[in-house]
Amino acid sequence: MYLRLSEYLRPSSVEESLRLIGGETTALLAGGTHLNVYGHEHLTRVVDLQHLSLGGITLAEGQQSQTIGTLVTLQTLARAELPAELAALQQAARAERNRAIRNRTTVGGRLARDRSDARIATALVALGAEVEVVRLEGHEVVHHVQPVEAFLVRDADARRRQLLAEVRVPLGGGFSHYAHFGLTAMSAPYADVALRVTDGVVRLASGGHGPGSAHTLRLGTAEGVVASIGVGDASGTWQAALREAVVADVPAYTDVYASGAYRRELAVALTTRLVEAWLAAQGVK
Amino acid sequence: MRFEATLNGRPVSWEIAPHAFLTEVLRAHGYVGTKRGCETGDCGACAVLLDGLEVNSCVLLAAQASGHALTTIEGLGTMDHPHPAQDAFVDAGAIQCGFCTPGMVMATVALCGDNASPTADDARAALGGHLCRCTGYVKPIEAVLDAAARLRGDAQRG
């Protein structure tokens, strides 16, 4: 027992929740699976969100985006009937192999509390998702929508004062896919990659990169290479260009495990595999 | 703070510390079939059912479980009348040291609760979050399939 909590609170509204947070020693609690891992010794108070209605998966009006509540569990997400174009998101949810953890871990928790961005974060960046965050400005509850990439930038002070309400994933057809690699099936990925191609627009993201906490990155240079491949390009010459591009996109971090270069190599291999899957889905061998 | 829940079909009301995880609260009240293993949600020895869903009680604050229905291994069967899943694990020889077995049995019950006819792949996936240092998983997977057959009312597998 390493936690030193003196208060557990279970508010019944978003506004009440926001009034309870803000200090360095207070944390929002969704599924809670991340709490009993060292690094939270400073917490004295947790604010459990389980009574808030943030657990639905719905199609937005006009069906232009899929809305996912922040308290949706990975198990619910993995089993939901989502459009095929969001395959990457469900594959990322299923990449958490432990069913008991999937039953508790939430989308919001993974985005807001994880110290290493991968899986859900990687898929959502590639899918071009936005998040809606809620915070108090004076006495007013203010809703703010931002790209998930902006949310993932670690601004500790902002994160302490806001609540992640929902994720919106744009719909528009096309292809998406996710792949990861870890030491075992149960391990968090050393690196992962997600790809989305919609009307010729390519989005690529890779997670697990960084010297301390691992970040999800957009692979902008690689996106350009993939966009230029063209459906009819079965020549196989794109692999070398893609490799060069991914290497350019992923910094060669030096970490205590000296794993930065290895993770970058994994990103190259996984990106290549996803592009091959995309080409295969279009009948290109 | 007060912890009020339905445990194995009976109401309980206990005084708990806000920082106490469910594993330790259960064990402190005599429910020692729930094992303390990794305490980071990796090994599955502490698995219980929360509102019918398998959860790792070592990474769940007891306070979070207050107000919910919990089932521990003690709630499944008795020495005289074991649960079919418990019988299946015994008959398959899916036990050596036995430390991981309660968690695996809880995972089996959870699986069979939403999939009456699991495949071997389903069984492997259900035991994916359960570490066993003794058996090599072959017998536990057989036990899961046998448990499902027993729960369906099929004749006991050979």
Image (spheres, rainbow, N blue to C red):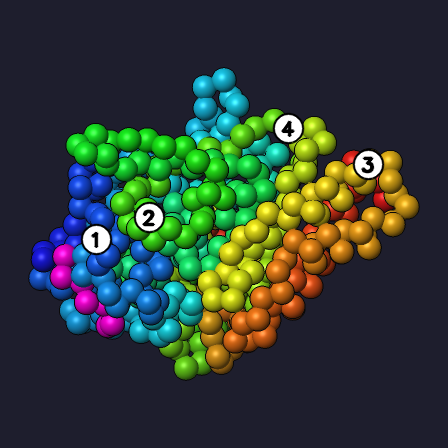
Marks 2/1: CA–CA distance: 10 Å
Marks 3/4: CA–CA distance: 18 Å
Dot 2 or dot 1, earlier in sequence: 1
For mark 1, give the secondary structure. Answer: loop
Badge 4 is on which residue?
A: A173
Q: Which mark is residue A159?
A: 2
Mark 3: which amino acid? Gly
Dot 1 or dot 4, earlier in sequence: 1
Range of the magenta residues? A1-7
In the shown orientation, is residue A217 left or right of residue A165?
A: right
Badge 3 is on which residue?
A: A230
Residue B71: horizontal and vertical position, in percent?
27, 57
Mark 1: which amino acid? Gly
Mark 2: which amino acid? Arg
Residue shown at the point (45%, 48%) measured from the top left: A152
Marks 2/4: CA–CA distance: 32 Å
For mark 3, give the secondary structure. Answer: loop
Is residue A6 within the magenta segment? yes
